[in-house]
Image: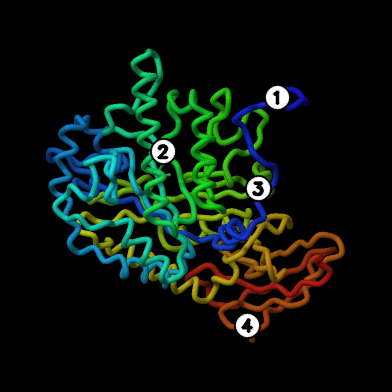
Amino acid sequence: HGQENESLKYGSQYEGKRQDEAMQKFRENRLGQFIHWGLYAIPGGKWDGKIYPGAAEWLQSWADVPPEEWSKLINQWNPDEFDAQEWAHMAKEAGFKYMTVTTKHHEGFCLWPSEYTDFDVASAPNKTDIMGELIDAYTKVGIDVYFYYSILDWHHPDWRYDIKSEEDEQAFERYKTYVDNQLTELVERYPEVKGFWFDGTWDKSVKKNGKWTLEIQQMLKSLKPGMIVNSRLRADDHGSRHFDSNDKLMGDYESGYERRLPSFREDTIVTTRDWEAVMTVPENQWGYHQDWSVSHVKSTNEVLEWITHSVAMGGNMLVNIGPKPDGTIRQQEKTLMKEIEQWMDINGEAIYAGDYLGWEKQDWGYYIADQKTNEVYALVFNVPVTQKITVATPEGISIEEAHPLKDESESLKISEKGPNEVFIHLPQPMFEAPYVIKLKVSGKD
Ligand code: FHN
């Protein structure tokens, strides 16, 4: 691309970060819960007696199950133990400020009673309106709810991967109407919804319909002012995704970081925009998989590091759970949430409304700046054998005091290391969890 911006009809709609209240809330939430739930929870990664190590919500594809056969799982949809209030309570305790849940994943099954299909909870043995119960329960405890919606649909006969013929064109037009209707239905049925998280938008059919992706975004915002839509929905005039052909972000925040995080060395550009990363607890399982021994399962401290890394670069993090077919949450995930809760109870103030600080990154961990209070936190993950961490400050800024969040009445010793560089002395013994220090800084802003 040259210097001149090309004029695009369906590219980015505004520059810079949205500053309205809804977006500020999103930005301050920082920590969210992702929920992947659907029929795929029933086989849980196992088909015809064989365990597939790939993502459980993709089993239909790994095991080559024809949609007609996969759809029969609807007869086994029986989440009799589902208790939305219990889920919401757990999420609240763990410190999640928002939650994003699959209304419909690639398999096409709808977790709300939809007027536009029979492949929904209303046609299953257990007819509970999952979306309705979740949005009520979570909203009641003060957690914002966002809807995940897969554009890719393995069930709908009119879905196309590409548009190659007149017939494809007509089918896809019908599919677009189906999606528009369902999205309108979701907002009208559940007006509390704060935003949409689109997925399954990478195929040529969608890339050739950049105009439609913009229309969806506009439609949602006109249905509900303040609505927040992720960049993954969008394609521009030439099929460029997330970022338009002029390299401008489309959608309200960047949603490209999935099971990976931006690097402090190469990707600090992310700190200039809103973004959100999403992570799985096992290597790559979003939906319920009955055998987690298929891959590494992250420890709580690893999950906390993912969260911290995101916030330290000015982003949000969604930590995923994949509930069981009966509606309960697996023990490992419950334990994880409990342990996140214990850490957040003490250290949450460093996470909420946290932001990029811009000081030189140190190997011991991460700095987080508070968007509102101007506080600075040092989150220690790697303890040096010297039991001291280096804090190098920009010119004119000095560290006056250091207090562990665990007990702010305690002070940690600070000693000079060199010009604009101090040591903060860590207490013995070693920590079991990431150790957070609040720094009293002078000269900043
Ligand atoms: O294919 C999906 C996958 O199953 C999961 O939903 C993730 C969540 O970000 N998104 C897609 C892969 O990028």
Cα distance between the residues tagged 1 and 2: 29 Å
Q: Residue 38: percent from the left, percent from the top? A: 27, 48
Q: Residue 394: percent from the left, percent from the top? A: 81, 59
Determine whether the residue tagged by mark 1 lies in a helix, strand or loop. loop
Q: Quadrant of the N terminus?
A: top right
Residue bearing the label numbered 1 = 6
Q: Amino acid at mark 1?
A: Glu
User: Looking at the image, is 372 positioned above or below residue 295?
Assistant: below
User: Looking at the image, is 317 positioned above or below residue 57?
Assistant: below
Q: Earlier in the sequence, mark 1 or mark 2?
A: 1
Residue bearing the label numbered 3 = 273
Residue farthest toward the bottom in the current orientation of the protein: 409
Q: Amino acid at mark 3?
A: Arg
Q: Earlier in the sequence, mark 1 or mark 3?
A: 1
Determine whether the residue tagged by mark 2 lies in a helix, strand or loop. helix
Residue in front for this viewpoint, 147 or 86 = 147
Q: Earlier in the sequence, mark 2 or mark 3?
A: 2
Determine whether the residue tagged by mark 3 lies in a helix, strand or loop. loop
Q: Residue 144: percent from the left, percent from the top? A: 47, 62
- Which label sits in the foreground, 1 or 3? 1
Residue bearing the label numbered 4 = 408
Cα distance between the residues tagged 2 and 3: 28 Å
Cα distance between the residues tagged 1 and 3: 21 Å
Q: Earlier in the sequence, mark 2 or mark 4?
A: 2
Q: Is residue 297 visible?
A: no
Q: Quadrant of the C terminus?
A: bottom right
**Disc number for residue 180:** 2
Cα distance between the residues tagged 4 and 3: 32 Å
- Which label sits in the foreground, 4 or 3? 3
Q: Amino acid at mark 2?
A: Asp
